[in-house]
Every structure is written in structure tokens, then in C-alpha cells.
Image: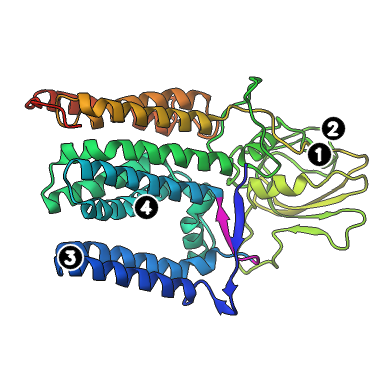
Amino acid sequence: MRSTLFHIPREVLGLPLFGFGLLLAVWAAVCAIRLGVVVYRRGWSSEVWNELPVMLLLGAVIAWVMPGLSDPYGLPVRGYGVMVFFGVVAGVALAVYRAKREGYDPELVYSLALWMAISAIVGARLFYVIEYWEQSFHKETLGATLLAVVKYTEGGLVVYGAFVGGVIAAAVFFARHKLPALRFADIIAPSLTLGLALGRIGCFLNGCCYGGVCDYPWAVSFPLGSPVYIDQASRGMLELHGIEFNASPNAEAIVRSIDANSPAANSGLKPDDSITSLSIDTPGEPRPLRIPPDEPTDFEPRPITVAAAVDALASVQLPSTRVTFHVLDSAGKSATRTWTLSSAAPVPDRSLPVHPTQLYSAIGAGLLTLFLLAWYPLRRHEGEVTALMITIYPVMRILEEIIRHDEPLNWTRMTISQDISVLLLAAAVTLWIFILRGPRLKYSVV
């Protein structure tokens, strides 16, 4: 796991890089060159008006969003975001290569890729935000909510949301440019699975999309602070002073159960207590660790997240460490629970070994990419490659979800991804019936 690869400094040669700074100037120059090339080759065609809104949108992100994503060290470059970027670049490069071999103008692919990439990321993020709204995105202010929504580079993109967003963008693009939809979909299908393969490596670097505990030789453990560590600690699978929380890292830190013999229980901490803040006074430290670190606001106290509580409690290891919880009890009344660690209580520095489901998915998507590329010259109907993709991937995802451990089951006794996989398989059956009734190709295009 390597969530943050490095930081990009806020300033270069004394000039601001983000906001209205050097990066925006470079982006403006790149857009001007790109538009100049398109206008020189084709005049003020619809292609210019297709790309201009996307260019302006990315410019707005540089000017107003990136400064909010920075921390005191600069703009963190996340492993997840980097692999998503590489997935987009690799997918576009493959699609351009295949389109040129089919006699299509590469500029079409670039325009399509731009719209699909933006729509896919928006769709993937919206799906995640809707699914985890209460746990992760319901903030005190509109600004805090918007900032949480746009911080996708730390994780939080759902594949099926990306698929829906990309399909909508592609359908509109095909219609506007009068392109044969099934033929063009067959060209770009392997690019989608290639991008997914690289994106899943980003999930591994981020520590999300993890599997259940196992003892296989290839099982991996993740460090303290990772989503799987927080999940296991909150469930009581890792020793955390006898306290168990609700399972989701971004959920509110509400005590689910507590060991009656633990010091925390002796302080009066009870199930259903919601932790709104905590203070940890460790011997030898100049000042206590406070979560949250800021002074209280005028808003009603809200519980901190499970992730914040677990991270803080993991530091409670030395004897005589004093812990103070500020809580809302089951009746909604404020209370204080204070306890002192009487003896050393080392906390595990890594999670229990789990299935590396991110790598399983990356390998599966990579093999699916090779299969789709191999099938393309053998197809006998337009749309076969696309139909194969939406037939095989849902089956892979249903099986993968059995050993994943990051999504809860719903009323169907399956995860939401399994539910959508079933719907996608139904759509695949409909697509197969449609394309097999269509005319056969007289020869395969290689």
C-alpha cells in the first residue's frame, strides 16, 4: 500500500503553481495549441465546440479545486489517482491504434475519450457519493461537502458508475457524429478493460476494495490507518482496548460493543455512545493529541469518524496514557468518559492477512482485455466483442464480491455490485439476441 506517492510543491520559483498560477497558464497554452491544430486542419467544426467545454472544466478544476486539495506539504499525488490516469492514457492509446487500423480518424477517438473520461469519473464518483452519502459526505457546510465529493484521488470511484457515465457519453457522441455504434463499441471495448486493470492496481496502492481474511501464501496485510486495518479494528478483530465500532471507516464512531473488563468500560463508556471528540495525553508528549484538532464550532457536536477514532486509539499503548472521550449517550446528552491505561497494551501495526482482491481484479481485467483483442478478428457480427465484455465481466465481479469484504449485503442478500452485475447480464442477453439476428460479417476485419 502506498496511498500518497509524493507531494507537488505549492510554489515553483516563488510563483504559485495551483489556482491562478503556473499550471493554469500551461493548461491554457496546451488548450490554445490543441484548438489551433484542430482549427487549422478542419476549421471551426463541431469538434472544437465538443472539446472546448471540457477544456474549460479542467481549467476550473486547476483554478478552484486543486488549491482546496492541497495540504501543508503541497498537492498530494495519490497512487490511486496516478493509476487511474495511466489507465485512461493506456486505454486511449490502444483505442487510437485500433481505430487507425480500421480507417477512422484518430481525432474522433481523442474527442470521444475526453468526453468518456470525464463522464466516467463523474459517474463513478456520483455512484460512490450516493452509496455512502450519510457515512462520508454529509458535512456541516456546503463547502466541506463539495470538497469531500471532489477528493476522488484518495479513492471512492465505483466501476459501474464509470460504466454508466461512459456509456451515456459514448451514446451521445456516436449519435452526434453518426458513427456505427456497435462497430465503434467493439473497437473501444478492450480499452475499457485495460483501463480497469490499471485502475485496480491503484485500488491496491490505496488499500481499498480489500478482501476477507485468509491464510494463503499470497495474502497481504495492510498498515495501520488503512481501510482494512480500520475495518478489522472496528469489528474487534484487532485488539483496540476492547472497543468495537460500526464497520465502515467513514461511518460515525458509535460504540457497538465494549469488553466489560477493559479500562474504557470502567470509565463508563457504553454501547451506543457516539464519540464527538477525544483527547489522548501520552506520558512524555508535550501536548495531548486531540481529535478533531480544531476548536469547537457553533454547530451541534457530531460524532467523529470510525477511521479517526481507530487512528487515535492505536496510539494508546504506554502505561499511564490518559484518554478522554466526549460523547453523546443513547439519550443524546453530552457526557465525558475518562480512563487511564494501567499497563502496556501494544497495538498491531498491520492488519490480519487478507485476499488481495484488487490484484485478482486487475489480473482478471488484463486477461479479459487479451481475450477481447483475440476475439475481434474472429467475430461474425458487429457488437460481439462488446457483448462478450458485458457478459464475462459481471460474472467475474459476482465471484469477486464473494471474497471482497468492503461492501455490505443488502435486502437481496448480495452487494450492490452483484445486483448491478445481474442487471448487466440481463442486458447482455438482450444485446446478444439483437446482434445475432443482425447480418453476419462477410469477412473479419483484422
Residue visible at 31% across and 72% down?
32
Determine the secondary structure under disc 4: helix
The residue under label 2 is 261
Distance CA(mark 1)–CA(mark 4):
45 Å
Distance CA(mark 2)–CA(mark 4):
48 Å
- Residue 122 lies, with reference to residue 163, above or below; the image says below
Residue visible at 26% across and 44% down?
167
- Tag 4: amino acid: Val
Which tag, 3 or 2, sits closer to the chain's start? 3
Determine the secondary structure under disc 2: loop
- Tag 1: amino acid: Ala
Distance CA(mark 3)–CA(mark 2):
77 Å
Residue 330 position within the rendered picture, expressed as x and y whole percent measured from the top left? 66, 45
The residue under label 4 is 122
Are the residues flagged by discs 2 and 1 in contact, CB closer than 8 Å?
Answer: yes
Q: Nearer the viewer, residue 100 or 274?
A: 100
The stretch of residues the image draws in magenta is 72-78
Residue visible at 43% across and 27% down?
364
Are the residues flagged by discs 3 and 1 in contact, CB closer than 8 Å?
Answer: no
Q: Is residue 74 magenta?
A: yes
Distance CA(mark 3)–CA(mark 1):
74 Å
The residue under label 3 is 41
Residue visible at 89% across and 45% down?
318
Instruction: From the image, state whether disc 3 or disc 1 is nearer to you.
Output: 3
Residue 124 position within the rendered picture, expressed as x and y whole percent measured from the top left? 39, 46
Q: Residues within 10 Å of mark 3 (few under 14, many from 20)?
A: few
The residue under label 1 is 265
- Tag 2: amino acid: Asn
Distance CA(mark 3)–CA(mark 4):
31 Å
